[in-house]
Image (cartoon, grey):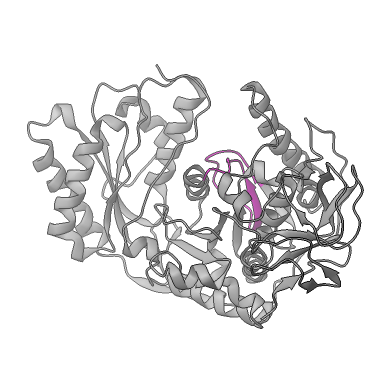
């Protein structure tokens, strides 16, 4: 197993793949101090003000002279990024061929959509009925759970006392859940007096099949639990009629996410997701990349892969629009890496972004989606959403992802309403947190090739799409978080 790596020959730093000791010789330099796993060390003299280069791109500049073998991190490096930028479209040719075929066992819905789970979802119009939803979930799972893949509710605090765009986003997010094909049937649960009452929500929701979607206003029911159970009996009977059948991977939509990143994220797990994204694109499938703040510093790589000028301009709006959101709230645009990220070896936002955007692979960017806009172009799509794990996985679900591929170097148990496949960046995490991790990308620094690991992981994804449970599903880790930007009354 390699103990250190120089990711690109243009780099002036190496990365420790395991903890290294002062005095060791690594990549031709003698370490001047201990280097923690995932962290960087200088490969040459780096004068004050000069760029630190990793992944062949600058990730910041030295704030003091850095000598060969010295630890390179937040104490001697600062970001190069600042403000809203102007961009010029410089397209690169990156169209991937349609030269692969694969299938999985999924559910073909009556409207033509495809699901990979046949669950019954309880969707609340307002947080006031969270307790009712949880009671119904528990009782219905006991009574009818053997009919379907699961019965689940998703609590949230919104649906009332919101204004403007926040209220609209809540409605659009909840509507996307009602229409999501992983739900074979849905109970829409309302209080009755909320801002997002059914008279207001139904026009946003649009047309639904009354056998698949049923509504309950709890203020109007003498016994809302009894009424809810009756409706869930009917909904589970309806959903139980659905059966798995072979479906082309061209109809699969995956969401790409990282959280609790470390210094190996951009070396193992994130490039693996990029390789799988490319492979699915070659099958005619679709991948969704979000976490817009974690594109800052690497955004031009994605912009120049846009399929045309119109998509490029949407990508510019995506990036600068999110920067303006930060500025509007008086926040530092480029202060992103969390304490856990920094402890794992990530120094600046450029460092994080150049690792994060590798999840998008090498193919064309086919479209850029607003929050809760449903994907309509196959291939790689960019999705408006923050880096926050819960908000991001919810945004991917709302855009139409069937499952989320979630890389982590620090570890996290979080799960989305859709299957969430956790990919460890390092073997130590995979072995220590087997109840969280579904796949180990750490094998990529233990002698396994990217090609064979990609094939292994792709088969894992097809198995999950065909019904194999992820760790988050086995432990019932399912959450949503609705993105908000304004006042709550």
Classify the position of the C terminus by image quarter.
top left
269 shown above or below 63: below
| 138 sits to left or right of 100 | left
The foreground one among 251 and 433 is 433
Residue 248 visible? The answer is: no
Seen at 69% across and 68% down, the residue is 21
Which residue is at the front of the view, 149 or 261? 261
Residue at 13% over, 47% down: 229
Q: Nearer the viewer, residue 40 or 153?
A: 40
- How many numbered marks are there? 0
307 relative position to 292: left or right: right
* Secondary structure mainly formed by the magenta segment: loop
Asked if residue 130 is among those painted magenta in the image, a careful observer would answer no
Residue at the extreme front of the image, as rendered: 23
Would you identify the image quadrant in which residue 181 lies?
Answer: bottom left
Per the rendered image, the range of residues in magenta is: 368-388
x and y, in percent, of residue 385 in the image: 58, 41
Spot the residue most to the top: 489
Where's residue 284, x and y in %? 63, 67
Q: Is residue 71 left or right of residue 337?
A: right
Which quadrant would the N terminus be assigned to in this image?
bottom right
On the image, the x and y values in percent for residue 312 come to 78, 44
Q: Position of residue 288 (x, y in %)?
A: 60, 54
Give the answer, above or below, for where 423 lies relative to 102.
above
Examine the structure image and report whether residue 375 is included in the region drawn in magenta.
Answer: yes
Relative to 122, is 479 on the left or the right? right
Q: Quadrant of residue 61?
A: top right
What residue do we see at 68% from left, 77% from top? 450
Q: Using the rendered image of the protein, determine whether residue 406 is visible from the camera's viewpoint.
A: yes
Q: Residue at x 32, y 25 (%)?
A: 199
């Amino acid at each position: 197993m390699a103990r250190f790596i120089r990711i690109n020959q243009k780099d002036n730093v190496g990365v420790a793949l395991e903890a290294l000791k002062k005095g060791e010789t690594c990549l031709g330099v003698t370490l001047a101090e201990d280097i923690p796993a995932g962290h960087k060390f200088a490969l040459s003299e780096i004068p004050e003000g000069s760029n630190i280069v990793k992944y062949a791109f600058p990730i910041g500049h030295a704030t003091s002279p850095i000598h060969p073998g010295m630890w390179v991190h937040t104490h001697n490096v600062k970001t190069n990024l600042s403000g809203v930028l102007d961009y010029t479209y410089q397209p690169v040719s990156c169209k991937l061929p349609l030269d692969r075929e694969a299938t999985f066992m999924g559910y073909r819905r009556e409207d033509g959509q495809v699901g990979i789970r046949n669950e019954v979802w309880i969707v609340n119009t307002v947080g006031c009925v969270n307790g009712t939803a949880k009671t119904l979930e528990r009782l219905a799972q006991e009574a009818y759970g053997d009919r379907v893949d699961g019965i689940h509710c998703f609590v949230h605090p919104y649906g009332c006392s919101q204004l403007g765009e926040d209220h609209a986003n809540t409605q659009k997010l909840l509507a996307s859940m009602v229409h999501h094909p992983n739900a074979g049937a849905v109970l829409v649960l309302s209080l009755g007096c909320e801002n997002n009452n059914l008279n207001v929500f139904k026009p946003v929701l649009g047309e639904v099949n009354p056998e698949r979607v049923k509504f309950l206003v709890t203020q109007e029911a003498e016994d809302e639990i009894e009424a809810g159970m009756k409706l869930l009996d009917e909904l589970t009977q309806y959903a139980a009629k659905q059966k798995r059948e072979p479906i082309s991977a061209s109809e699969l939509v995956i969401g790409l996410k990282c959280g609790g990143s470390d210094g190996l994220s951009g070396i193992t797990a994130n490039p693996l997701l990029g390789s799988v994204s490319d492979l699915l694109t070659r099958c005619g499938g679709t991948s969704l990349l979000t976490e817009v703040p974690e594109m800052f510093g690497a955004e031009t790589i994605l912009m120049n892969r846009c399929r045309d000028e119109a998509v490029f301009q949407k990508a510019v709006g995506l990036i600068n629009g999110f920067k303006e959101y930060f500025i509007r709230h008086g926040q530092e645009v480029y202060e992103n890496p969390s304490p856990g990220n920094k402890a794992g070896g990530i120094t600046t936002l450029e460092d994080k972004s150049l690792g994060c955007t590798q999840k998008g692979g090498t193919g064309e960017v086919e479209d850029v989606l607003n929050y809760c806009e449903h994907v309509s172009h196959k291939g790689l799509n960019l999705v408006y959403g923050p880096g926050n794990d819960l908000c991001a996985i919810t945004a991917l679900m709302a855009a139409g992802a069937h499952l989320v591929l979630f890389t982590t170097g620090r570890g996290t148990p979080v799960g989305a309403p859709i299957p969430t496949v956790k990919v460890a960046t390092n073997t130590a995490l995979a072995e220590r947190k087997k109840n969280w991790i579904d796949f180990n990308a750490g094998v990529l620094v233990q002698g396994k090739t990217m090609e064979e690991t990609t094939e292994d992981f792709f088969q894992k994804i097809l198995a999950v799409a065909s019904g194999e449970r992820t760790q988050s599903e086995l432990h019932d880790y399912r959450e949503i978080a609705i993105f908000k930007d304004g006042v709550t009354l």
